[in-house]
Amino acid sequence: MVTGSNRVFEHAGREFHIQVEDLAHGDTLEVRVYDKGAVLFVKRVPYAEAVAGAPEREDAIRAFMEKTIQTVSAAIAKGKIA
């Protein structure tokens, strides 16, 4: 099991904490964005979406987590998550 990935993304003078976590029941990833402890965004993604067509499950999950952090960072930069 991959536990999670975290990143701080600075934008417009704010620090956003982006967290992608493997939930305990093992079939869902949860994405959260925080600003000063306040939750700004939450989304749950089924494993099927994260590992579709990948030969190595854990590698696919890690790659999906990193891709998700990049996607969420871009959404923040574009003002889609404020």
Image (cartoon, rainbow, N blue to C red):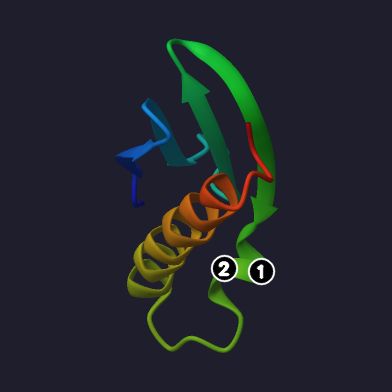
Q: Residue at x 51, y 49 (%)?
A: 77
Mark 1–mark 2 contact, CB under 8 Å? yes
Q: Which mark is residue 60?
A: none
Determine the residue located farthest toward the front in the rendered image.
Answer: 12
Determine the CA span between mark 1 and mark 2. Answer: 6 Å
Q: Amino acid at mark 1?
A: Ala
**Left or right: where 75 falls relative to 21:** right
Looking at the rendering, which quadrant does residue 41 occupy? Answer: top right
Q: In the image, what residue type sits under mark 2?
A: Ala
Question: Where does label 1 land, which residue?
Answer: 48
User: Residue 52, how many percent across, how many down?
Assistant: 61, 81
Q: Which secondary structure, mark 2?
A: helix
Q: Nearer the viewer, residue 22 or 39?
A: 39
Residue 4 location (% of width, % of height): 36, 43
Above or below, comparing residue 21 to residue 2 in the picture: above
Report which residue position mark 2 lands on: 50
Secondary element at image label 1: helix
Instruction: Identify the residue at horizontal 49%, vertical 23% (top origin).
Output: 34
